[in-house]
Image (cartoon, rainbow, N blue to C red):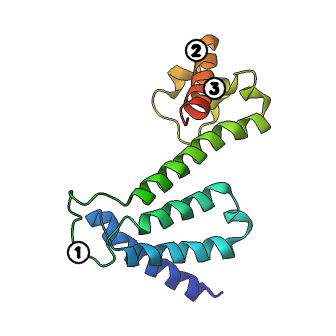
C-alpha cells in the first residue's frame, strides 16, 4: 500500500465523518462506508490493531449502521424508535465490555486481587487532571474502596 493510497483512505474517511460530527446524524450508507474503511485498516494493521477494542469499535459501528435511515433525510423524527434488535445488540455489547473489563483483571496483575490498583493509578494515568494529586495522597482505605467499587460493583455486578 502506498502512502498516496493511505492518504486517500484518510481523506475519504474524514470527508464521511466530518458531516456526522457537525450535524450529529447521517445515513446508513455513510456509516457503512466508514465501517468498511475502518475494517480495512484493522485487517491490514496487524499487531497495532489486534487489541480487543478494535473489534468492539467495529461492532459498535456495525450496530450504528442500522440505527440510521438508509438515505440522508435530515433529523430522525422522535416518534421513530430504534429497531429493537439494535437496542438489544447494543445492550449485549455493553454487557460484554463491562463484564469483560472486570474479568480480564483477574488474569493480570495481583493489584486487583489485593485491591491496591488505585494506589498506583493516579501516578500512572495517561492524562492526569487537577484533582489527581489530591486523590493520590488519599488514605489507603479510600484506594481499597475505589478498587473494590470499580472492579466488583461497577464491572462485575452492575452488568447483570
The quadrant of the image that shows the C terminus is: top right
Please state the horizontal and vertical placement of residue 68, each as a whole percent of the image: 34, 68
Percent x, y of residue 75: 21, 66
Residue 108 shows in the view: no
Residue 73 disc label:
1
Q: CA distance from mark 1 to mark 2?
A: 51 Å
Q: Which badge, 1 or 3, comes first in the chain's sequence?
A: 1
Q: Secondary structure at mark 3?
A: helix
* Relative depth, front residue between 140 and 95: 95
108 and 81: which one is in front? 81
Tell me residue 50's x, y (percent): 70, 62
User: How many C-alpha atoms fall within 10 Å of the one at disc 2: few (<14), some, or many (≥20)?
Assistant: some
The numbered dot on residue 149 is: none
Of mark 3 and mark 2, the one earlier in the sequence is 3
Label 2, secondary structure: give it: helix
Mark identifier at residue 118: 3
Residue 108 falls in image quadrant: top right
Residue ID for mark 2: 142
Residue drawn at x 44%, y 81% as measured from the top left: 12
Mark 1 in CB contact with mark 3 (< 8 angstroms):
no
Assess disc 3: are there few (<14), some (14-19) or many (≥20) residues with their C-alpha within 10 Å of its C-alpha.
Answer: many
**Residue 69 located left or right of residue 35:** left
Marks 3 and 2 in Cβ contact (< 8 Å): no
Q: Residues within 10 Å of mark 1 (few under 14, many from 20)?
A: few
Amino acid at each position: 500500500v502506498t502512502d498516496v493510497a493511505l492518504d486517500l483512505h484518510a481523506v475519504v474517511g474524514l470527508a464521511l465523518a466530518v458531516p456526522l460530527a457537525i450535524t450529529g446524524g447521517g445515513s446508513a450508507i455513510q456509516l457503512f462506508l466508514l465501517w468498511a474503511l475502518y475494517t480495512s485498516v484493522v485487517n491490514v494493521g496487524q499487531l497495532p490493531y489486534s487489541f480487543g477494542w478494535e473489534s468492539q469499535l467495529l461492532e459498535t459501528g456495525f450496530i450504528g449502521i442500522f440505527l440510521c435511515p438508509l438515505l440522508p433525510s435530515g433529523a430522525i423524527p422522535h416518534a421513530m424508535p430504534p429497531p429493537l434488535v439494535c437496542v438489544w445488540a447494543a445492550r449485549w455489547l455493553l454487557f460484554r465490555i463491562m463484564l469483560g473489563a472486570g474479568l480480564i483483571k483477574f488474569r493480570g496483575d495481583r493489584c486487583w486481587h489485593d485491591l491496591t490498583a488505585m494506589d498506583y493509578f493516579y501516578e500512572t494515568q495517561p492524562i492526569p487532571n487537577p484533582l489527581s494529586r489530591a486523590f493520590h495522597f488519599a488514605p489507603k482505605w479510600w484506594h481499597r474502596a475505589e478498587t473494590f467499587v470499580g472492579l466488583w460493583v461497577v464491572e462485575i455486578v452492575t452488568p447483570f
